[in-house]
Amino acid sequence: MVIIFTDENFEEGVLRSSLPVIVDFYADWCKPCKLMAAVVEEISNEFEVKLKAGKVNVEDSRAIAAMWGIKSLPTVLLFKNGEVVDKAIGAVQKTVLVEKINLL
């Protein structure tokens, strides 16, 4: 299950999470973001006991996007213990993200 992170739940859901978290930063108008949404959904289902998966709409949560320096869409950040440990910019293949997750 992919969680929608907002200004209200980002700190608790991502920064204080006991599990690693993959966060997809997107916008509704972004076509490559739609591709990444499907990839993150698949990862969410495959790794549901190993990590949390979520997404942030950068237009609805501009402060979060600014806090993490999101300048290109889609951008996927991997968090562990409240810290960014890896990232992917642009639409990337699922295998790229799975490799990154397996290193956590």
Image (tube, grey):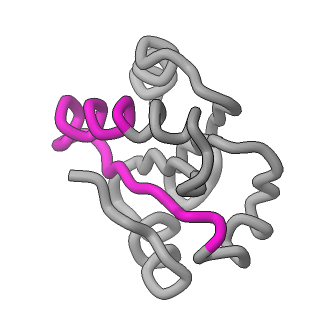
For the point 64% across and 65% down, which residue is it?
58
| Above or below: residue 48 compared with residue 26 | above
| Above or below: residue 96 compared with residue 15 | above
Q: Nearer the viewer, residue 90 or 52?
A: 90
x, y percent for residue 70: 76, 54
Quarter of the image for residue 63 reads: bottom right
Q: In what quadrant of the picture does the C terminus appear?
A: top left
Number of numbered markers: 0
For the point 32% across and 51% down, which residue is it?
52
For the point 44% across and 69% down, which residue is it?
5
Is 65 colored magenta in this rendering? no
Q: Which residues are magenta?
A: 38-59
Quarter of the image for residue 33 reads: top right
x, y percent for residue 66: 79, 68
| Above or below: residue 16 compared with residue 28 | below
Quarter of the image for residue 91 reads: top right
Is 52 colored magenta in this rendering? yes
x, y percent for residue 90: 67, 30
Q: Is residue 84 left or right of residue 2?
A: right
Q: Is residue 103 left or right of residue 53?
A: right
Q: Nearer the viewer, residue 73 or 102?
A: 73
x, y percent for residue 34: 46, 39
| Above or below: residue 86 compared with residue 18 | above
For the point 81% across and 57% down, which residue is it?
69
